Amino acid sequence: MSEHIVSPRVYIVIFLTLMAGTAATVWAAYQNFGQFNIVIALAIATFKATLVVLYFMHARYSPKRTQLVIVCSVFWLAIMLALTLSDYNTRTPRDSRLAPSAISHLFRV
Amino acid sequence: MHRTGELYGHFETLEQQKDTATLGMWIFLVTEVLFFGGLFLTYTINRHAFSTAFGVGSNTLDLTLGGGNTVVLIMSSLTMAMAVWSAQVGKKQWVSIFLIATLALGTIFLGVKIVEYKQKFDHHLVPGRSFDVRYRSEHPTASDNPKEIAAEKEELEKAFAKDPDINAHAQLYFSLYFGMTGLHALHMIVGAGLLLWLIKGSFAGRFTPQYNTPVEVVGLYWHFVDIVWIYLFPLLYLIDRHQ
């Protein structure tokens, strides 16, 4: 098994795509898509990050166990984001027990 | 430790050694993903709670400098990737050239960051006692465009009407701005140190088609730092540009 050498042509195509992505991000930020501005910005950023991981970081040509580690990092990140945000989104200000006034109340036994 | 050339005694082949080093770097990067992930999470929650203040804070950033820096950093990723390729195909001289180019681009990025930070100090936009989100619009300098200042005044008036406590909430934005870009810059400085070490090795002709693990592994780190910026740029600089 010999290592895979990514050719400079592939690197340059990826680089140009990343540049186009950056231009698209700036362009999209000046349009009013309402709630979707942030969704579009994150979608483009994730697309760019995926290209960097697959080609610049050679993930596409890495051994399976390395790819498993990469997928795990995304999975753990998703757990952290999903659980924390679902907690914040389901609290009303009334029961946010970590508010400073609520903490002082807890200590007043 | 027993070592034959670049091969350490506990590995069978250089390829196995490289796979192991790469895996180790990736496992470190997983912890980095979660580290920066926590910061992005904090950002998300606060931006959701104080969207007006975050929009005002974001619009004070210089898009030319931030966008230019994005281009510079992506270019440095390209030169880093090319340094790996040069080592793999045995172009020893080009390894040095591409590594030096990567270091130069990284240094430009950090220099621009210093200019941006200085602006924020000048405009009283560093969290603390003298923080004043209105400072720039009330104390314009001769070099400021009067139209821009008038637009900023109008924007701030509207923002204060929506969120009277905006001066406090904008400090949350700038705390995250300095915290996140500062930690990103710290990673760049570490990366620059690693590049210096690689450049020294490349001058000694250490990296060959058979052995280029250090270039590959430092490259992984460098590209990761690039990815963090790919997210930081739209999230910090482009919140409310269309308004």
Image: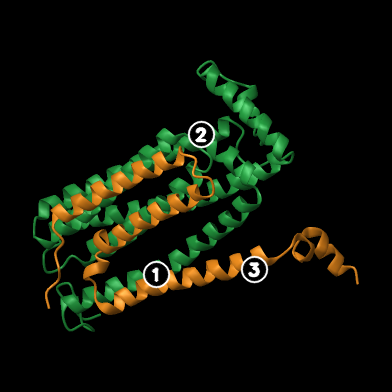
Chain colours: A orange, B green
Q: Which residue is drawn at 24% across and 65% down?
A: A58
Q: Mark 1 lies on which chain?
A: B
Q: Residue at x 60, y 39 (%)?
A: B126
Q: Residue furthest left?
A: B90
Closer to the chain start, of discs 1 and 2, is 1
Task: Identify the residue position indicated by label 1 in the image.
Answer: B28
Which numbered marker is on residue B72? none
**Frontmost residue, B7 versus B18:** B18
Answer with the quarter of the image where residue B68 lies.
Answer: top left
Q: Residue furthest right?
A: A109
SS category of the residue bearing label 3:
helix
Q: Give the amino acid type for the residue marked by disc 1 in the picture.
A: Phe
| Same chain shared by disc 1 and disc 2 | yes
Q: Mark 3 lies on which chain?
A: A
Q: Are marks 3 and 2 in contact (CB under 8 Å)?
A: no
Gap in Å between the C-alphas at discs 1 and 2? 33 Å
Q: Give the amino acid type for the residue marked by disc 3 in the picture.
A: Asp
SS category of the residue bearing label 2:
helix
- Binning the other alpha carbons within 10 Å of mark 3 as few (below 14), some (14 to 19) or many (20 upward) gives few
| Same chain shared by disc 3 and disc 1 | no
As drawn, is B158 to the left or to the right of B57?
A: right
Answer with the quarter of the image where residue B194 lies.
Answer: bottom left
Residue B80 spot, x, y in % from top left: 24, 53
Q: For the residues carrying marks 3 and 2, which lies nearer the camera in this image? A: 3
Where B66 sits versus B217, above or below? above
Which numbered marker is on residue B118? 2
Q: For the residues carrying marks 3 and 1, which lies nearer the camera in this image? A: 3
As drawn, is A10 to the left or to the right of B23?
A: left
Q: Give the amino acid type for the residue marked by disc 2 in the picture.
A: Lys
- Binning the other alpha carbons within 10 Å of mark 2 as few (below 14), some (14 to 19) or many (20 upward) gives few
As drawn, is B24 to the left or to the right of B14?
A: right
Q: Residue at x 25, y 80 (%)?
A: B1
